[in-house]
Image: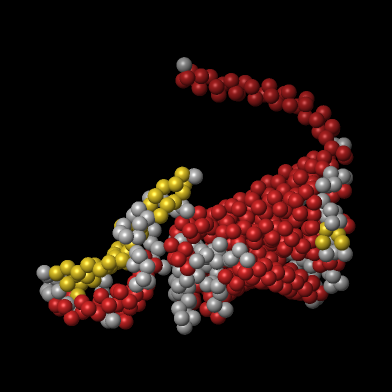
Amino acid sequence: MKLIIAMIQPHKLPDVKKELFAADVHKMTVTNVLGCGQQGGYSETYRGVVHEVNLLKKVRLEIAVNEDFVKVTIDAIIKGARTGKIGDGKIFILDLPECIRIRTGEKGKEAIG
Amino acid sequence: MLKSFFKIMPKAMLLALPILCWIGSFAAPAWAEEMATAAQVETLTNNLNIVWTLVAAVLVFFMQAGFAMVETGFTRAKNAVNILMKNLMDFAFGSIVFFLVGFGLMFGVSHGGLFGTSFFGMSGMFGSEGGGVEWSWTFVMFQTVFAATAATIVSGAMAERTKFVGYLIYSVVISLFIYPLFGKWAWGSLYIDNGAGWLENLSTGAFCDFAGSTVVHSIGGWLALAGAIVLGPRIGKYLKDGTPQAIPGHSLPLAALGVFILWMGWFGFNPGSTTTGDGSIGRIAMTTNLAGAAGAVVAMLTAWVLFKKPDASMTLNGGLAGLVAITASCATVTPIGAMAIGSIAGMVVVFSVLFVDRVLKIDDPVGAVSVHGMCGLFGTLCCGLFNAEAVLGIGEVNTGLFYGGGINQLISQVIGAGTAFVWAFGLGLILFTILKKTVGLRVSAEEELRGLDLGEHGMEAYAGFQIFTTE
């Protein structure tokens, strides 16, 4: 089992969701996050004073999958999120030792699916 | 020390009261006698009219706040600064332009009933004609806030995707001549007798639009329709197959506050249009309120039947729909007539929103086209149906079809409302297309997604809060 964490541009979320659903991946957690990477920040002005914003709005997706779903999930995220410009985001993949469904007490592969 | 003061106070007042009454009993008759002279009664009446009209102007001005809150509430957080700026600046630009040019075109000496030719920048307005110097100031102020109301309707329909510069240019043009010229045709004689417009001299009877269902609301609504068409829908509003998507507004509390403010402002908009401090203002306040109430009730019920829930945003639109619809006929219908008009408007607005959204596929984020355009049109026609001057004791005959007045008034209403549509929608299409081809009317897709607050103004409405910008 793997935990896939992806950071994407907020406005690409609808596209990514669409691709994930098309690839039969229906379970995910989405969080609003701030972060910085290669993209750099931008400057706002307030009452004539410039202030730099370094932390940009991003969306963080967390998807737990079985081994055979790792590649399809990654492909779907890339297909939905890629524009070719700096700032498209990153995908992290972690090993997931255990997963338990609270309602039934199921563990492992059954609990994820 | 303080305690003893309060102990003494009531006793002192008891003593003072008979003394004051005694003094008053000498002063009162003398004072009354003095006031009874005709000239002074006239001065007092004139001043009363001025005070009432200016109070009403202030109420109508505050409708700007109402529009700002409704439009902000019904759109997304990332565009709040932009919509507030549009509401502020169309009033500011509009006030100046209307003073310099618009008022003269609208109320100056009429050229063939088509446009005014005097009073630009209020020059030459201080003769005795038109009610005297003091009245001139009041009247221009009152008309300025009306012009600004028409201008500000459009910002809602064009929300979340319009270039700020393009919108500013539009706001100057509407106050410069689009609103004033139609205003001349329908209301030209309100200031001086030789200012009358052609819609006031129709052979079927003068076009009836007491406070501006057509002159203000439809003109704004039809321009909004033209703007929304030329702009195109927001990104994500329609799927590839044309299915409309919901883009929920970010603050229903702000939207509701805006509707309450607008409703309050309407007590200046309609009763104030008498520009006279007499008994009719109470009656007009009643018809106005009943129509708004009926509009909200029926819109809620309609939404409840259609969507299985009493939708708050539709109900808020419904209250406004009733108010817009009664604006033309508020001075000439009975309370029952007012409720009928408001009720039908409440239904019209819900179906109109659905029609614009699903059939025409025009993206109007706040329902401005339906509330102001459609319900303004409907309300204008209602003069020809519900006018009951004789029943109210304010005229010789009823001009409404339902009160035995025949079809003539209705024909005048159709001519006036039809002219307004052709004028505002036609000019709107031309104006917005020119803007699109020159300065540009729409922001880039990237900016639209990130929000116009950052793109156009470089700042956020809710600094310190984390706002979702996922659609």
Establish if B172 lies above or below B362: above
Q: Which residue is outermost to the bottom? A: B241
Closer to the camera, B364 or B79?
Answer: B79
Colour theme:
secondary structure
Residue B247, quarter of the rendered image: bottom left
Residue at the location (76% across, 64% down)? B182
Establish if B30 lies above or below B122: above
Residue B211 x %, y %: 72, 60
Q: Is residue B155 visible?
A: yes
Establish if B104 lies above or below A80: above
Residue at the location (50% across, 72% down)? B303
Tell me if B91 is positioned left or right of B466 in this view.
right
Q: Is residue B417 visible?
A: no
Residue at the location (59% across, 59% down)? B165
Residue B225 x %, y %: 62, 70
Number of numbered discs: 0
Closer to the camera, A108 or B287?
Answer: A108
User: In which quadrant is the C terminus of chain B drawn?
Assistant: bottom left
Closer to the camera, B344 or B456?
Answer: B456
Q: Which residue is outermost to the top? A: B1
Residue at the location (84% across, 70% down)? B202
Residue A48 x %, y %: 49, 45
Establish if B319 lies above or below B401: above
Residue B396 x %, y %: 84, 64
